[in-house]
Image: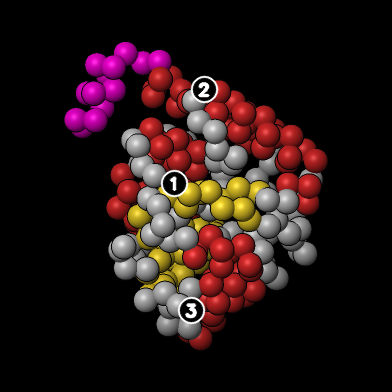
């Protein structure tokens, strides 16, 4: 088994009320690891999130902060943290603390048990009804298009860092996570699923669901299906060689 050391990206956009709790959850979950670094990506926050992140980094040597000058979106922050990751495994934990502390611990406890740790919502009823409907529809669509049987594609998957860096993504929308996971599975990498407990945030509102994001997600899935399943094999082989 590879060394149990992980880089955890914590994307945070106006999460001043939740960020410190998220960092505490990650530190507790990785207490038995040989090493851990937390990279907070302050995505142009205006509520003091960036200043709080800097203070937490001073308090804990394992915390680093990247500041985006404006709100560039989760995908950009994730890729920036991935590029700077120093540990052999990589994942993210949202700064809004919607993933329970116990779930963070359970997800990270499976590092090294398979190539990819794939979380899914174990208490879907705790999420807003429209988010449940969108999740079920998108998950069913991906499973049909690619022949998989996963329960969720948008969770905080844990990857070997080198593998995560090699996975092609084509969108800055939230569904870049599904792109990564589908490509990893299509390459034949092993995975283990683990349930996570969703808890409603105590401050602010989710920024993931909007009409624009739904449209971008559908376009991303269809584009991925075309690239991996429909496009003539000769073009797929040419892409591998680039």
Quadrant assignment, res 212:
top right
Q: Secondary structure at mark 3?
A: loop
| Residue 41 rendering spot, x and y as whole percentages | 50, 62
| Residue 49 rendering spot, x and y as whole percentages | 61, 69
Mark pair 2, 1: CA separation = 19 Å
Residue 145's label in the rendered image is 2
| Residue 222 rendering spot, x and y as whole percentages | 51, 22
Name the residue tied to disc 3.
31
Q: Mark 3 or 1 closer to N-term?
A: 3
Mark pair 3, 1: CA separation = 24 Å
Quadrant where the N terminus sits is bottom left
Q: Is residue 48 above or below residue 195?
A: below
The residue lying at 59 percent from left, 59 percent from top is 94
Residue 191's label in the rendered image is 1
Looking at the magenta stretch, what is its main secondary structure? helix
Specify whether 51 is left or right of 82.
right
Q: Nearer the viewer, mark 2 or mark 1?
A: 1
Asked if residue 2 shows in the view, the reply is yes
Q: Within the magenta stretch, is there residue 21?
A: no
Specify whether 18 is left or right of 36.
right
Quadrant assignment, res 237:
top left
Q: Secondary structure at mark 2?
A: helix
| Residue 78 rendering spot, x and y as whole percentages | 46, 53
Q: Which residues are magenta?
A: 230-242
Mark pair 2, 3: CA separation = 40 Å
Q: Mark 2 or 3 closer to N-term?
A: 3
The residue lying at 48 percent from left, 73 percent from top is 30
Asked whether 61 or 27 is in front, the reply is 27
Q: Mark 2 or 1 closer to N-term?
A: 2
């Amino acid at each position: 088994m590879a060394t149990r050391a992980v880089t955890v990206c914590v994307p945070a956009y106006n999460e001043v009320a939740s960020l410190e709790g998220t960092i505490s959850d990650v530190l507790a979950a990785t207490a038995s690891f040989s090493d851990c670094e937390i990279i907070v990506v302050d995505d142009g926050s205006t509520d003091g999130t960036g200043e709080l992140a800097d203070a937490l980094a001073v308090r804990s040597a394992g915390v680093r902060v990247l500041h985006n000058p404006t709100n560039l979106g989760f995908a950009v922050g994730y890729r920036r943290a991935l590029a700077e990751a120093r540990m052999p495994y990589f994942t993210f934990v949202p700064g809004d603390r919607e993933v329970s502390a116990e779930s963070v611990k359970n997800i990270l406890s499976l590092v090294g048990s398979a190539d990819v740790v794939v979380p899914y919502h174990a208490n879907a009823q705790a999420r807003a009804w429209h988010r449940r409907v969108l999740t079920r529809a998108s998950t069913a669509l991906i499973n049909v298009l690619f022949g998989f049987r996963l329960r969720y594609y948008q969770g905080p998957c844990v990857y070997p860092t080198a593998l995560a860096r090699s996975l092609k993504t084509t969108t800055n929308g939230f569904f870049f996570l599904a792109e990564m996971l589908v490509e990893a599975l299509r390459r034949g990498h092993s995975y283990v699923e683990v349930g996570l407990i969703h808890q409603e945030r105590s401050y602010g509102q989710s920024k993931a669901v909007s009409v624009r994001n739904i449209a971008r997600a559908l376009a991303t899935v269809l584009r991925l299906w075309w690239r991996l399943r429909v496009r003539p094999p000769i073009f797929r082989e040419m892409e591998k060689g680039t």
